[in-house]
Image (tube, helix red, strand yellow):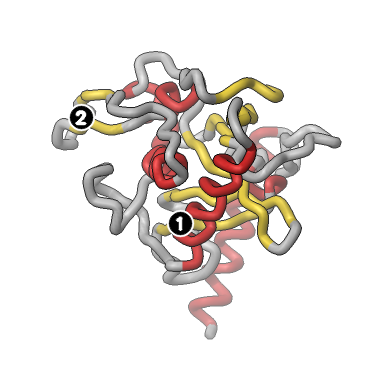
Amino acid sequence: MVLHAFRLLAAAASLALFAACTGRKAATILPDGCRLKAGDVVFRLGNGLTSRAVLMADGGGTYSHVGIVVDSCGTMMIVHAVPGEPDYEGDPDRVKMETPEKFFISVNASKGEVRRFRGDPAVAEAAARCALSLYERGVLFDHDYDDADTTNMYCCELVEHSYRSAGRPLVGGARHSFSLPGLKPMRCILPSDLRGSDELELIVSF
């Protein structure tokens, strides 16, 4: 109990230090009045080293992380697969569901964008239901970034898999091949692949 309390205090201190260093309080960057729909694909640019690594691999891409909007009992939420954002001590890297305001909290997001499926809304809704089921199943984060294995998921894989399950993949066979220092060569979907999909249209960027 004492150790847990100490870790909570340390986390709070880190957040306070972040706010002091950046000169602002942690707050959502999502614009007021932004109306999300089930199946919307949301993009954010993170502030950490992992985000910089994604941008490096993405060859000058704009965003480092993606999620998909789902309808959870009438409330729009965002499902995404993310590492390093535990909700509690011992929380594994996994598929999570959060409010849009939390997904776009300034601690984790410096800019964002919403894109919407151009076709039949029923397809977008089916994709959202698939994503929600992945969250409900407790699917873990895929640290191997292997979209041939859908037992675990990374963020772009989750979105593409959800739309593929609905019969309308967003990027098809497009993949990035790259190597980062200290890691084995990878071939996977990156945020720019989804952002460049002809199946999606821009709703808002902020």
For disc 1, the neighbor class at 10 Å (few under 14, some 14 to 19, many from 20) is many
Q: Quadrant of residue 124?
A: top right
Q: Which mark is residue 25?
A: none
| SS type, badge 2 | loop
Task: Give the x, y percent position of residue 13.
Answer: 62, 56
**Disc 1 and disc 2: Cα gap in Å?**
26 Å
- Which of marks 2 and 1 precedes in the sequence? 1
Structural crowding at the residue carrying mark 2, measured as other residues with C-alpha within 10 Å and reported as few (<14), some (14–19) or many (≥20)? few
Q: Quadrant of residue 55?
A: top left
Q: Position of residue 41 (x, y in %)?
A: 57, 35
Location of residue 178 with respect to 65 vertically, above or below: above
**What residue sits 53% from the left and 34% below the top?**
46
| Residue that carries the numbered disc 2 in the rendered image | 181
On the image, the x and y values in percent for residue 47 come to 53, 33
Residue depicted at x 44% and y 18%: 61
Residue 85 at x, y percent in the picture: 49, 54
Q: How many marks?
A: 2
Between 97 and 73, the residue placed more toward the observer is: 73
- Amino acid found under the numbered disc labelled 2: Pro
- Looking at the image, residue 75 sits to the left or right of residue 47; the answer is right
* Disc number for residue 95: 1
Specify the amino acid type for callout 1.
Answer: Val
Kindly check if marks 1 and 2 are in contact, taking CB atoms under 8 A apart as contact.
no
The reply to whether residue 53 is in sight is: no
The C terminus, quarter of image: top right
In the rendered image, the vertical position of residue 196 relative to residue 69, given as above or below: above
